[in-house]
Amino acid sequence: MPVPANTGLPTISGPAQTGQTLMASPGSWTNSPTSFIYQWNRGGTAISGAASSTYIPVTADVGFTLTVSVIAVNASGTSTPTSAPTSAVVQLTIPVNVTKPTISGIAQVGKTLTASTGTWM
């Protein structure tokens, strides 16, 4: 049997944002791969320890594109295509509360309570 042959490149789904999960699909293959090995790349360089079908971008990825290389394995050998790049990774900003929300009024049946949202950055 020949080595695995890629007929459709691996793909990445999910937002290119820090803290958000990206998922890799191995693509389409012929010659019956028996397993797949994943390697995530930042700006074309392998990311140490990023070797599963999912990856969560970190601050070091901000400004870089990510790709995933998929090594398809069978008894005859391996083949390694790489996905198209994501857009440049952006920092996900989480709102920070500066002033706590409040509730005013009398907590009594028939009375109106009013809420303020507080202040957020």
Image (cartoon, rainbow, N blue to C red):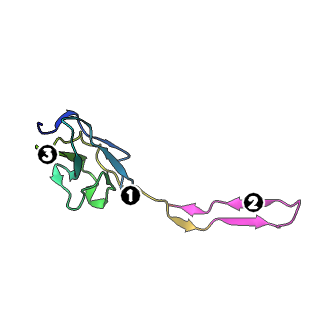
From the image, tell me which residue sits under label 2. Answer: 114
Q: Give, as a single range, the part of the protein colored magenta.
A: 101-120
The residues tagged by marks 1 and 2 sit, at their Cα atoms, a distance apart of 35 Å
How crowded pointer 3 is (Cα within 10 Å; few <14, some 14-19, many 20+) is rated as: few
The residue lying at 26 percent from left, 60 percent from top is 60
119 or 9, nearer to the observer:
9
Secondary-structure class at tag 3: loop
Q: Earlier in the sequence, mark 2 or mark 3?
A: 3
Q: Amino acid at mark 2?
A: Thr
Q: Earlier in the sequence, mark 1 or mark 2?
A: 1
Name which quarter of the figure residue 111 lies in. Answer: bottom right
Q: Amino acid at mark 3?
A: Ala
From the image, tell me which residue sits under label 3. Answer: 75
* Magenta highlight on residue 27: no
Q: Position of residue 44 (x, y in %)?
A: 16, 49
110 or 4, nearer to the observer:
4
Identify the mark at residue 19; answer none if there is no mark.
Answer: 1
The residue lying at 15 percent from left, 43 percent from top is 80
The residues tagged by marks 2 and 3 sit, at their Cα atoms, a distance apart of 69 Å
The residue lying at 21 percent from left, 51 percent from top is 41
The residues tagged by marks 1 and 3 sit, at their Cα atoms, a distance apart of 37 Å
Secondary-structure class at tag 1: loop
Q: Does residue 121 appear to the left or right of 90 in the view shown?
A: right
Q: Position of residue 94 (x, y in %)?
A: 46, 59
Secondary-structure class at tag 2: strand
Task: Nearest to the eye among marks 2 and 3: give it.
Answer: 3
Q: Does residue 100 appear to the left or right of 114 in the view shown?
A: left
Q: Amino acid at mark 1?
A: Gly
Q: Does residue 106 appear to the left or right of 83 in the view shown?
A: right
How crowded pointer 1 is (Cα within 10 Å; few <14, some 14-19, many 20+) is rated as: some
Identify the mark at residue 69; answer none if there is no mark.
Answer: none
